[in-house]
């Protein structure tokens, strides 16, 4: 039986060339494999890169990055989306030790009531993260949170993206799934919802820079059913850079409790992703241990 490799990309890919992106992912993986004297054990033709970057941008009404934080926080979101953003931002600032005083320094007004429903405070928190956490970017955090929320809660967005990604699964063959960022949420939901029903055989799910451990995201996923390794998946390898603000938490029982507990997620956090945001796909796929996990899944 042939084994295939399916890549599931994250957000902010609109306007890019899908073939070129696939080549960049494979080149980064080749670099990671070469560190262990390995090469890709399958043909590049057996790797698949379902591209939904332009579709996601159209469905979520893309906002220019330089205006993202202002537009999203100052009224371009419904109350549920605003509450979701507030919860994510608050957890990030707590995790990185950004103090109330540091946030007050970013406020336009001299005094303002602190609280999750105060959007001036949320905006100031984004600015404080920008200033005090080198790998953070307020526009990127705001846009990422918006896209995740719309994917998780918008039936049209979710159905359209899921349908496109599902077409990459060859009938009757085994598929190793490697997902990054928002793509890890897409892959998890798709495999959980459809994997067993469709008869997909996934020896391994590899997630890179996954936000599953963020409380607001985990709660939405848990609300859809029990958190578990998808039934069609044999093993789950999760790589994260501790400085990657998107991958805020490892997928341990504390932050992502599975029922049943096995197969457990294997977490690999010994990564120093040299990408400016510590979130770039090149740094993840170029990591030797991550590349080896993909190799073993393809050859096991």
Image (cartoon, rainbow, N blue to C red):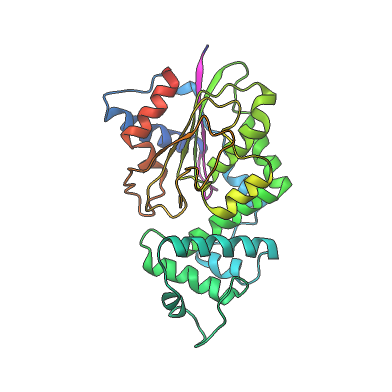
Residue occupying the point 53% across, 11% down: 1
* Horizontal relation, residue 167 to residue 11: left or right: right
Task: Please tell me whether residue 74 is drawn above or below residue 183 in the rendered image.
Answer: below
Q: Nearer the viewer, residue 265 or 117?
A: 265
User: Is 132 drawn above or below residue 20 in the view shown?
Assistant: below
Q: Nearer the viewer, residue 90 or 79?
A: 90
Residue 6 magenta-highlighted: yes
- Name the spot of residue 245 as percent of width and height, x first: 44, 55
Quarter-wise, where is residue 137 in the image? Answer: bottom left
Percent x, y of residue 5? 49, 26
In this picture, residue 177 sits left or right of residue 163:
left
Q: Is residue 171 left or right of residue 123?
A: right
In depth, the one of 191 and 219 nearer the eye is 219
Q: Is residue 273 visible?
A: yes
Which portion, as a residue range, is magenta?
2-17
| Residue 151 can be seen in this image | no
Residue at left offset 63%, top offset 31%: 166
Residue 114 magenta: no
Location of residue 134 in the rendering, given as x and y in whole percent from the top left corner: 35, 62
Q: Nearer the viewer, residue 5 or 200?
A: 200
Q: Position of residue 58 (x, y in %)?
A: 65, 51
């Amino acid at each position: 039986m042939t084994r295939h490799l399916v890549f599931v990309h994250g957000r902010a890919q609109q306007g890019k060339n899908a073939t070129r992106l696939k080549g960049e992912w494979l080149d980064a993986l080749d670099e990671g494999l070469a560190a262990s004297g390995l090469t890709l054990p399958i043909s590049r033709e057996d790797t698949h890169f379902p591209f939904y970057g332009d579709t996601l941008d159209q469905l979520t009404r893309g906002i220019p990055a330089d205006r993202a934080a202002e537009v999203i926080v100052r009224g371009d979101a419904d109350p549920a989306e605003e509450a979701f953003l507030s919860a994510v931002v608050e957890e990030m600032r707590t995790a990185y030790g950004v103090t109330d005083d540091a946030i007050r320094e970013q406020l336009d007004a001299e005094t303002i009531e602190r609280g999750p429903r105060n959007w001036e405070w949320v905006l100031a928190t984004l600015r404080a993260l920008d200033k005090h956490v080198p790998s953070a970017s307020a526009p990127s955090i705001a846009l990422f949170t918006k896209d995740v929320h719309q994917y998780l809660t918008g039936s049209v967005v979710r159905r359209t993206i899921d349908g496109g990604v599902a077409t990459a699964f060859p009938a009757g063959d085994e598929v190793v799934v490697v997902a990054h960022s928002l793509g890890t949420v897409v892959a998890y939901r798709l495999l959980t919802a459809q994997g067993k029903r469709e008869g997909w055989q996934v020896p391994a799910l590899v997630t890179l820079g996954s936000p599953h451990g963020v409380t607001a995201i985990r709660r939405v996923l848990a609300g859809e059913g029990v958190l578990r390794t998808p039934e069609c998946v044999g093993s789950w390898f999760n790589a994260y850079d501790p400085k990657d603000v998107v991958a805020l938490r490892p997928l341990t029982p504390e932050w992502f409790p599975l029922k049943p507990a096995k197969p457990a997620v294997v977490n690999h956090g010994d990564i120093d992703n040299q990408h400016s945001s510590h979130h770039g796909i090149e740094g993840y796929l170029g990591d030797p241990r991550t590349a080896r996990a993909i190799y073993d899944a393809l050859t096991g």
